[in-house]
Image: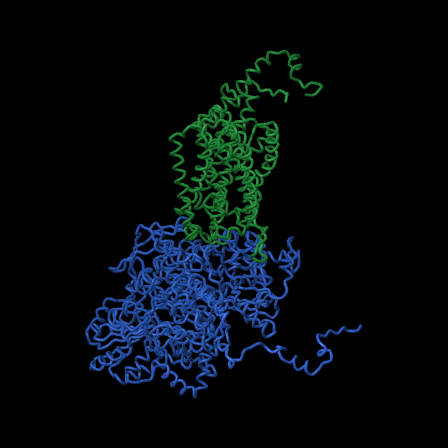
Amino acid sequence: MQKKEHWQSFGQKDGSEAFNQLAKDEFQESLPVVSPDEGLFDAKAPRRDFLKYLGFSTAAAALAASCEMPVRKSIPFLNKPEDIVPGVANYYATTFVQDGDMIPVLAKVRDGRPIKIEGNEKSTITKGVTNARVQASVLSLYDVNRVRNPKEGKGNEPTFEAIDKKIAQALAGNGSKPIVLLTSTISSPTIKAAIDDFTKKFPSTRQVTVDAVSYSGLLQASEAVYGKRAIPGYRFDKAKVIVSIDADFLGTWVSPATFARQYAEGRRVTDANLDMSRHFQFEGTFSMTGANADERYTFKPSQTGAVVLALYQALGGSVSAPALTEQRLKDGIVQAAKELKAAGGNALVVAGSNDKNVQIVVHAINELIGAGGKTIDWTGTLNYRQGIDADMVKLVDDMNAGSIGALFIFGPNPVYNYYQADKFKSGLAKVPLTVAFAQVEDETATLCQYILPVHHYLESWGDAELKPGYVSFLQPTIAPLFKTRAFATSLLKWSGNDKDYENYFKEYWVAKLGGIDAFDLALQAGISEPAQEPAIGTAAFNSGPVSAATSALAQAKAGGQVEVVLYQKVSIGDGALANNPWLQEMPDPVTRITWDNYAILSPALAAKMNIHAGDHYEVEIGKPTVSVKVGDKTYKLAAIIIPGVHPDVIGVALGYGRDPKIGLAGGGIGQNAYPLVGYDGTGFTYAATDASVTAAGDTYKIAQTQLHNVYEGRTSVIKEATVGTFRESPDIFRQMDKELEEEYGDNFRENGTLYKDEDVYDRFGIAWGMSVDLSACIGCGACVVACNVENNVPVVGKIQVAKAHEMHWIRIDRYFSGDMENPDVVFQPMMCQHCDNAPCENVCPVNATNHSTEGLNQMAYNRCIGTRYCANNCPFKVRRFNWYDWLGADSFPDNQKPLVEEGWIDPILNDMNDPLSRMVLNPDVTVRGRGVMEKCSFCVQRLQEGKLNAKKDSRPLRDGEVRTACAQACPTHAIVFGNANDSSSEIFNLRKRENKNRVYYALEELHVLPNVNYLAKVRNTERKVGMEKEA
Amino acid sequence: MSLLKYESTLREPLVDGDKDYHQVSEDICRPIEVKPLKSWYVGFGISVLLLLFGVYSIYRDVTYGIGQWNLNRTIGWGWDITNFVWWVGIGHAGTLISAILLLFRQGWRTGVNRAAEAMTIFAVMCAGQFPIWHMGRVWIAFFVMPYPNTRGPVWVNFNSPLLWDVFAISTYFTVSLLFWYSGLLPDLATLRDRAKTKFRKFFYGLTSFGWSGSTKHWQRFEALALVLAGLSAPLVLSVHTIVSMDFATSVIPGWHTQIFPPYFVAGAIFSGFAMVQTLLIITRKVLRLEDYITIGHIEAMNKVIVMTGSIVGCAYLTELFIAWYSGNPYEYDAFYKYRIAGPYVWAYWTMMTCNVVSPQLFWSAKLRRNIQFTFIMSVVVNIGMWFERFVIIVTSLYRDYLPSSWSTFYRPTIWEVGFFMGTIGLFFTCYFLFAKYFPVIAVAEIKAVLKTSGENFKRGMEGIEKESVDEFVHKHAPSEHGH
């Protein structure tokens, strides 16, 4: 057949040269462009046209003047910066530094604004982990309460130069009185160098390091028996047996995110490999770490010495331990000792106590079991905490004696968290020169003569040495928002150096790394580490101080009626980040309470005060209060009944009761428990062993996100079993599957239903899936905050959380099981399950929620009319309704203000809607208006971005290229996300091969066909927990 | 029709007293033509105040958000949908009386049908408020209307029971309104003809649509009544069936039950008749209509109440039985742990007492015919039926599959109560206006009833009773030549 030829002109037909010439150009005919030389303005306007132009322009001017045009403040770049593409994020490596904790991170910067923090996976220490505090820290950058100007006295706002002059004068006139730099732990080599420079200029300078929650006992014990004042490098991943004596190492102890990663590595199980570490926890209250333990025993703080000694004794230490009366505790210690011994050095004992003697004995125990060099690294010691309590106490005495010449405070907030705050305050008044380097006008800064605002870490240059040789850098991700200056710059200025810290830092590292290129590369990577990881080191143990320590411990005083344990919450910690609404609204892993501190106590103790954990207690927001009396201090706190707390112990969280001035989120929330901290002559004690408690009679409203504490034996929600049971019967979690398999074969999900939906079962291309390993999840809440940040999830405030109006797209359900005295805990992250046969989808009258071809259950916010039927019909109750206009998104301007005034909504909403706070919003995610339903979207904006990138490169999407925010933030890799149709993906491998026997779908019998699966929890215990093999 | 309709002397007359047609018109139209009583003003004033409070409550809800209700992430519906179902249920008695009793040729319906139908319309109006204003974004409520639109290829979801509601309720309202209004035509014409003031002449002239009472009009009137009755009869069953599907088609334990359609319909009729009792016992007293709404009417309705109440009771017990028998642990828990026990135990037992136990007293004829007792019972039944909906909605939602999400104790806020009060205000405002400006009893239909019941009729009967059988047959039997 002959092909028909079409031609447009003879030229084309003949292929003439003239035609070919024309066809080469994009526009075949010349464009009517007037060249600038000819000048548009030179064109002659005919006289008659003049009137037309006049008329038109007058009319246009009148129109423009009379119609109010909306003012849009968007300022375009005059010249586009090389590295900024609108709508495309840049990532900068930096380091989260807060009160000694250091985590290498990447800051996601969109259009010049840092909006999200991810872990820096290049760091071999953290391997990209983050925790809730890191995730939330980006909001502190935009805190409306930050100090915006240097301040002198009250209200006077001079310039830095003016202050520099005055301080220089004051320092010159100081004479030889000591100048004290009161700092929290500083691990920055360059800041330390700057301090050295300053000390050279002013030789009377001394640095006092104080940590809000101190590790002084551990540091001093290490110094005593190993000659190193350091926290050893713990390796929870290497330990087969972990014994923790009141150390909340997964939640708040030293560097919890790193420890959590190590811990999870040592406990990760697959169907083939059920070898996981054993974890014993001894504690008074109920920590998140305790919730993850295989065996958990309780003791009173006054028994700490006895417990440690008993363990030492059981391991063969020559010591006479005071008698413990509780049989269960005694058995536990014996059992722990037995297993520690059997582990052959692959064991680790840690203690949370700040008592030097306790830590000495713990060191001795670790020495006995041979942990040094195996699970305890004395080469790679940790720089996270360096404060020595006695120094601080001495400083306060000196201040009161009037012997201190100047006090520069960078970091600590002793007016809030020193155990004798009044004494510190009176001392502060006696110091001739007081300067606070602060981000917010906190309790201490307001009492200082000068406040020099410092950068947020996202605005800072800097470095942090996590452990010797392992440095992580800080670089600014945004120009300083306010008139702030680095602490070190001030020191350098005052010591006569005209360099600012940025250059000082740069010169230091250029010299150290050997060139500007190496420096740039290191900055880009964010880290500088030894090329080869040094082997886990040992240190010589000096057993000398042990006997003194044991005899001191043996003489411990007995406790009173009840004992108070002062603990830190996973979210708020020591209180420095208390003004972060995301952290305040993150439910505590164990109590599931937001926005408050309270007294946690056991059901037995509560029952003594006639408070019973019945239906009434459960469903009422107002919880009965108790008066906790320690010495002359009385606290009236809500009684929160938590099974598994020692019957004579009350737990009260530190970090609350901040001054209202620090902001609406943290100020005035809860009560300050720091005054209950004691001092035993060498270190602070975070327990009050002689306390009494009585029912106070009234109630106090508590904003709790989970009221019911047990899963009522609903094994299709939670599946758990012991390792032994699972090993014996690998099919234990798949009983129903097995029955169905017999009848319908491997594809029973497809073949076993009458309602076979081709769209669901024969999906090709991408099928998004998520897997959540209940064995790996520790309940830390990093995913919750990461999701909040990524998806613009609004903060609703305490009043609204109490009404169960919280908006979190992902939550971590916590269930107790077993008996009331010693329950087991399981954490279950719960988010939209993206059901393929979703009950929410078919009840929406307007199709606002529907299904994508990739298996996403998606919300079309613009369609939603807000009937809430979808939320009612969701078996997982993961849908969240916008009861109010949380983020000022809808067409009623400021409509939440009157409600704030009337007390319906917490005033925090005003802060969150401040233009400054709103800079944290992710521009890729819609801000939802009032009356709209929302829920987890599997971070669809990330999926789209990943797919587009792949498409641009003409390649299939790679596994791991897109991750949801929760999966990325999870420090234990409990959440795995990917394309379940891709047989090379991790999720496919895990579902079909590696963990096939643990895979289950929550509430599978409803046939909602979730795209999220869970991996059943296995516990390394001999006790009977969870499902048991049928006889 | 020459076929004699025989009413035994033993049978209670449907209209008391020796009334002629004029007397009937006088009795029923009088309240419309005189100044209302002081009590009317008081009642009307209170109703309007309640209505205004409701309007303000809704204003707050729309302007500031539904967060002012104490609904939460677990209990997505509370007072709003409880009230919706309650009002829809109340409406059902009117349709049943006007449609089904008409088709079954129950003469006694004429005394009560007009007021009952009006009640239906007002109740449906009240009911309709809730699904509308409970929406988060009521300003785009029109998205539920399937019409060609410019919003892209988006269309309503025909799978959703909420959409079925839209059709069911709007159809129901339309048919009920037509039925009621067409029935009113002859009576409005009567009022027009009796009118003495210009305004009345104009108003009733306009509203009576030029009714002249011609045979053709009557013929068409009767035909229309039958057609509309035929249309409404299935609606009596379908509307509440569909409302019940709002729950029955879901996956929530306590909602996902197949018994819901019949159970809801029975409950609706039950509460509807109770509401008719409440209204008519007051109306007959205030408007002095005891002769037309007789104790016999009240007793007849009480019989319906005891029957439907027993059906509802059976349904409750069936639910409990199935919750146990099915072996579904979630359903078992929902019923046995969190309904008949648990924090909402009082709601369940209030429902049981009011709906199942107390109506059984109506087995006693003495109590059935006791007006005070009936009035109290009618209120009790409606309290019980309100709680039934509350129990179904709230106590199913507050504890469902995942114990982690189980909710706090749900108490309504002032604005939720305000909304409900507002609909009560709307209902009574409408009813007061209706009672003042429209005949509360169907005049024309009562006159028709007089042909076969009442003193007049019985007097005529006396002569017939005395006739011999032959005479009677000769006179009254259909002749062989037809009639």
Q: Is residue A772 left or right of residue A667?
A: right
Residue A164: x percent and y percent?
27, 79
- Direction right: furthest residue: A1
Is A808 or A139 nearer to us in this picture?
A: A139
Q: How are the residues colored?
A: by chain
Residue A779 in sight: no
Q: Is residue A7 left or right of residue B299?
A: right
Work out which quarter of the rendered image holds the C terminus of chain B and state it.
Answer: top right
- Direction front: furthest residue: A47
Q: In the rendered image of this protein, which colour is used for chain A?
A: blue
The chain shown in green is which? B
Work out which quarter of the rendered image holds the N terminus of chain B and state it.
Answer: top right
What residue sits 20% from the left and 81% below the top?
A173
Q: Is residue A442 left or right of residue B343?
A: left
Is A621 or A20 nearer to us in this picture?
A: A20
Residue B323: x percent and y percent?
54, 45
Residue B215 in sight: yes
Q: Is residue B341 left or right of residue A446?
A: right
Q: Is residue B244 above or below residue A269?
A: above
Is A348 or A748 nearer to us in this picture?
A: A748
Residue A792: x percent and y percent?
45, 63
Residue B296: x percent and y percent?
51, 25
Is B60 or A94 nearer to us in this picture?
A: B60
